Amino acid sequence: MHKAETKLAQARRRVEAAARRADTRGWVVARRERTRHLIELGGLVQKAGLVNLTDDDRATLYGAMLDLAARAQGEDADNILALWKRRGKRAFDAEAKGSDAP
């Protein structure tokens, strides 16, 4: 009877461990998605030339981004966001056409 109780306890531990791993996997997936998103945003900062423009000075970059955020929340936010979106789309399109050129 002791052997059966031990096997039951082992089975419970395996089930609990599997549940913990499943929880961890969900957390890991969310973390990886967030990391990928942050890397993409960093790539956009690089692509826009902001890193070279500011000599990789993080305070300057942060200040510029704070200014952008303030403008995007101001009175003319809709127009500013629309303007930035158009410029971004044009730049992406121009880059795509340039990379397809022989």
Image: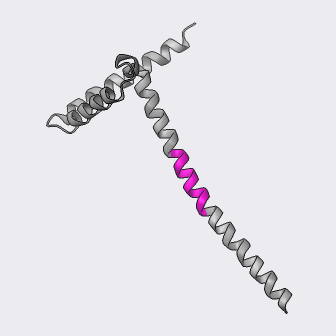
Main SS category, magenta section: helix
Quarter of the view holding residue 71: top left
Residue furthest top as drawn: 102
Say whether residue 44 is left or right of residue 81. Answer: right
Q: Please identify the quadrant where the N terminus is shown.
A: bottom right
Q: Position of residue 93 (x, y in %)?
A: 43, 20
Question: Residue 21's spot in the image, x, y percent?
Answer: 65, 62
Q: Is 37 drawn above or below residue 52 in the view shown?
A: below
| Location of the C terminus (image quadrant) | top right
The residue segment tinted magenta is: 23-33
Q: Is residue 14 above or below residue 90?
A: below
* In magenta stretch: residue 27: yes
Residue at position x 43%, y 22% in the image:
47
User: Vertically, is 68 above or below 32?
Assistant: above
Q: Residue at x 49, y 12 (%)?
A: 98
Q: Check if residue 38 falls in the magenta segment.
A: no
| Horizontal relation, residue 81 to residue 42: left or right | left
Number of marks drawn: 0
Colour mode of the rendering = one colour
Q: Residue at x 35, y 17 (%)?
A: 53
Residue 16 place in picture, x, y as percent: 67, 72
Q: Is residue 70 left or right of residue 53?
A: left
Which residue is painted at 38% across and 18% down in the image?
A: 55
Q: Answer with the quarter of the image where residue 15 lies.
A: bottom right
Toward the bottom, the furthest residue is 1
